[in-house]
Image (cartoon, rainbow, N blue to C red):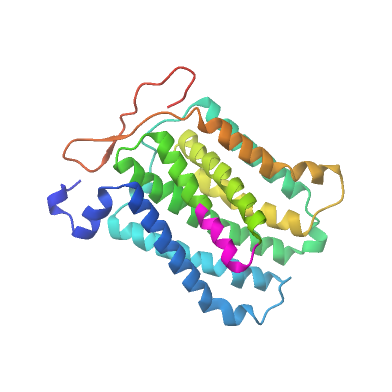
């Protein structure tokens, strides 16, 4: 990898990492994403809110635009191979608890959707939108944010907290769309816990592809099961998923340990986690 002196100012700026740069990136992304959504607004006003076209135009296409912006950013820095390559710090067995909690309730929600009422086109469009959402939000927060925090040499518990907090902060913007304050606070709490679970999924699977896919099944299962719930006791159990994810995320957060350090004179990350603390994974 070239040394800092041979880098462009743009690449050198981001390679140094840092929490404030992670915040800057998320804020700029959010502004561009919201601005891009206005492009589709005239078309959105012409489609039925209950239709697959509404999901496509109102959710999938704006997020797809965000995916493109994130890929362009990664290409400009040469980070994509680093981002989608193996993680430089290993995970521990207990991190699978976070994966299991999210996956279990995704399966339960998908099992308690009234598919006849929803219709194939709506379900298929939500699955497509979920893939875009999973890619954009994971690449941004568990990809670039985590990378920036690690490049600055922050401990992994801070990496996890900042990536989850910025992820939750993205969803606080729903206040601007008229969502009630209480509902937004609940959503922020859930997305913080979910963000911790996705960080742990990143660690324990060793590749960002798996949190992307896990996330991609979460949003469609939530929206479809909320809008088209099937009758039965299992539906009520599936509805507990958000609470469980918050609890699992907050409890497992306290066990996160480790640190990635940069080699002297080399901005690339080195796999040098600190020794594990008793009863804690690295």
Tell me: residue 221, above or below residue 31. above
Q: Where does residue 185 sit, x and y in percent of width and height?
A: 61, 52
Please state if 169 lies on the left or on the right of 231 as rendered: left
Residue 84 visible in the displayed image: no
Please state if 185 lies on the left or on the right of 67 as rendered: right
Magenta stretch: dominant secondary structure? helix
Give the residue at the far left of this rendering.
5
| The C terminus - image quarter | top left
Q: Where does residue 213 sit, x and y in percent of width and height?
A: 55, 48
Residue 176 visible in the displayed image: yes
Please state if 56 lies on the left or on the right of 93 as rendered: right
Q: Which residues are magenta?
A: 169-179
Tell me: residue 112, above or below residue 136. above
Q: For residue 152, what is the image quadrant?
A: top left
Q: Where does residue 116 sit, x and y in percent of width and height?
A: 82, 61
Q: Residue at x 52, y 26 (%)?
A: 93
Residue 129 is covered by the magenta coloring = no
User: Which of these two is toward me, 97 or 52?
Assistant: 97
User: Which of these two is toward me, 35 or 128?
Assistant: 35
Q: Residue at x 61, y 34 (%)?
A: 248
Give the residue at the far front of this rendering.
181
Q: Residue at x 49, y 47 (%)?
A: 165
Q: Where does residue 33 sit, x and y in percent of width and height?
A: 47, 67
Residue 176 is covered by the magenta coloring = yes
Q: For residue 270, what is the image quadrant?
A: top left
User: Which of these two is toward me, 193 or 211?
Assistant: 193
- How many marks overall? 0
Tell me: residue 163, above or below residue 223. above
Please state if 177 lies on the left or on the right of 150 as rendered: right
Give the residue at the far top of this rendering.
278
């Amino acid at each position: 990898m070239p040394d800092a002196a041979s880098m462009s100012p743009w690449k050198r700026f981001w390679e140094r990492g840092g929490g404030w740069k992670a915040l800057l990136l998320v804020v700029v992304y959010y502004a561009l994403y919201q601005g891009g959504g206005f492009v589709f607004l005239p078309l959105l006003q012409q489609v039925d809110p209950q239709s697959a076209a509404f999901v496509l135009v109102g959710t999938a296409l704006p997020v797809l635009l965000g995916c493109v912006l994130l890929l362009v950013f990664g290409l400009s820095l040469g980070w994509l191979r680093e981002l989608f390559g193996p993680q430089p710090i290993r995970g521990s067995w207990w991190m699978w608890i976070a994966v299991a909690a999210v996956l279990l309730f995704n399966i339960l929600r998908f099992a308690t959707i009234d598919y006849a009422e929803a219709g194939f086109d709506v379900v298929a469009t939500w699955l497509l939108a979920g893939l875009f959402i999973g890619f954009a939000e994971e690449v941004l927060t568990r990809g670039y944010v985590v990378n920036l925090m690690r490049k600055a040499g922050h401990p992994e518990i801070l990496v996890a907290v900042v990536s989850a907090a910025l992820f939750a902060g993205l969803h606080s913007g729903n206040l601007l769309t008229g969502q009630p304050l209480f509902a937004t606070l609940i959503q922020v709490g859930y997305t913080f816990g979910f963000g911790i679970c996705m960080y742990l999924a990143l660690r324990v699977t060793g590749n960002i592809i798996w949190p992307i896919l896990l996330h991609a099944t979460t949003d469609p299962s939530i929206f479809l099961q909320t809008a088209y719930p099937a009758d039965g006791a299992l539906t009520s159990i599936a509805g507990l998923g958000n609470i469980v994810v918050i609890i699992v995320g907050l409890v497992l957060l306290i066990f996160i340990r480790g640190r990635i350090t940069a080699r002297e004179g080399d901005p690339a990350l080195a796999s040098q986690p600190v020794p594990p603390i008793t009863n804690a994974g690295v």
